[in-house]
Image (spheres, grey):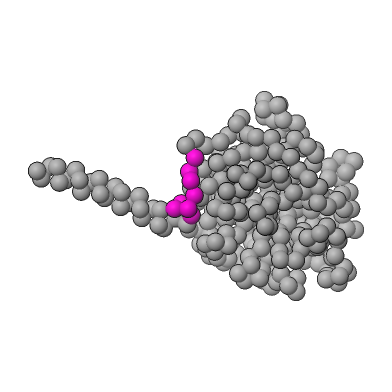
Amino acid sequence: MKKEWGIVLAVVLVFAAIAVAFATIPELRNSVVPAKARSIEEAQEIELTLVYEGEKTEGVGSVQSFAITDDYFVIAGRPKGSAEEGGERDNQLILISRDGKDVTRDHITAGTVYQLGHANGMTYNPDRGEIVVVGIRDEQGNCSRAVKIDAKTLSQISTERMPCFGSGISYNDRFNYYMIRSGKMLYRVGDLPGSVDDMYKLDTEFTVQDIGYHNGYTYLCNWVSDGDVARAKQLKLEQNQNVIYKVDASGTIAGAFIIRSPLLELESIDFANNEAYVLMNGVGDKSAYFYIYRVLFDDADLR
């Protein structure tokens, strides 16, 4: 009898441990972990519809990231060149209205610049009315700084130290934390400045770009660059095609989506009104332009 009670107690403790995990890790109790993680080999092809096409502002060599606020698509641009050549100083913001008009000069004085470094990632925190940008280098040259911008006045508020390097960022407005992408790692951070609460290793491919959050999932942008061509050919992909990964709250890949056309550089993804939007840089003969597209996900892909 004692042995049987011991078995029962062990089972109860196992279930209790599982319950604690689901209670303490945000969204595990609200998301469904798929039976099998999705890989690039299983990726679905997905289409886009154009929202905005525009010429880059004078002094902007490339657009790097964006966030959707209550009023605009807020886009971070950086000058041409490397960090040593001045390509990570005196950034500009571009504002595109939600109905597809450039309204930058209506709200930002000509000549206004920001210190956003490479500006690899951007997100909007509606709870604090702040836009957060990552990709700013510290004294050692590491991208371990974040800049906060007031979403209404569009003035730069502060520069904060991050607990990890940052190549992409999203804000979870449901549980009030940030996800920060750093190469093939994803970090959960409660605040900036702050500490790492959890981390996940990502099984993704191709050049790492920005991320976005929606309804319990983090969406990761990846671009097939010239350095990715050999691997891309194995998967029947071309240079300047793009991949979006969907990752659940446990760091498991729950979906992968290929953008075959247009042949542009995918930079950033964000969500509004249950719709997904991406920011893309023009390449080749389109390098003077940038684009915003709506991603035609199925409703099931946004759950």
Please name the residue shown 87% across and 68% down the image.
105
Q: Nearer the viewer, residue 4 or 128?
A: 4
Q: Position of residue 219 (x, y in %)?
A: 62, 48
In the figure, residue 244 lies in which quadrant? top right
Please name the residue shown 86% across and 51% down the image.
53
Q: Is residue 131 visible?
A: yes
Q: Is residue 37 above or below residue 14?
A: above
User: Is residue 124 rendered to the left or right of residue 286?
Assistant: left
Q: Nearer the viewer, residue 65 or 184?
A: 65
Q: Which residues are magenta?
A: 27-34
**Magenta run includes residue 176:** no
**Magenta run includes residue 33:** yes
Q: Is residue 200 visible?
A: no
Figure label count = 0
Q: Position of residue 217 (x, y in %)?
A: 56, 50
Please name the residue shown 14% across and 42% down the image.
4
Q: Nearer the viewer, residue 165 or 132?
A: 132
Q: Main secondary structure of the magenta part?
A: loop
Please name the residue shown 66% across and 70% down the image.
129
In the figure, residue 25 lies in which quadrant? bottom left
Q: Position of residue 182 (x, y in %)?
A: 60, 50
Rendered-image quadrant of the N terminus: top left
Query: Which residue lies most toward the front here?
Result: 299
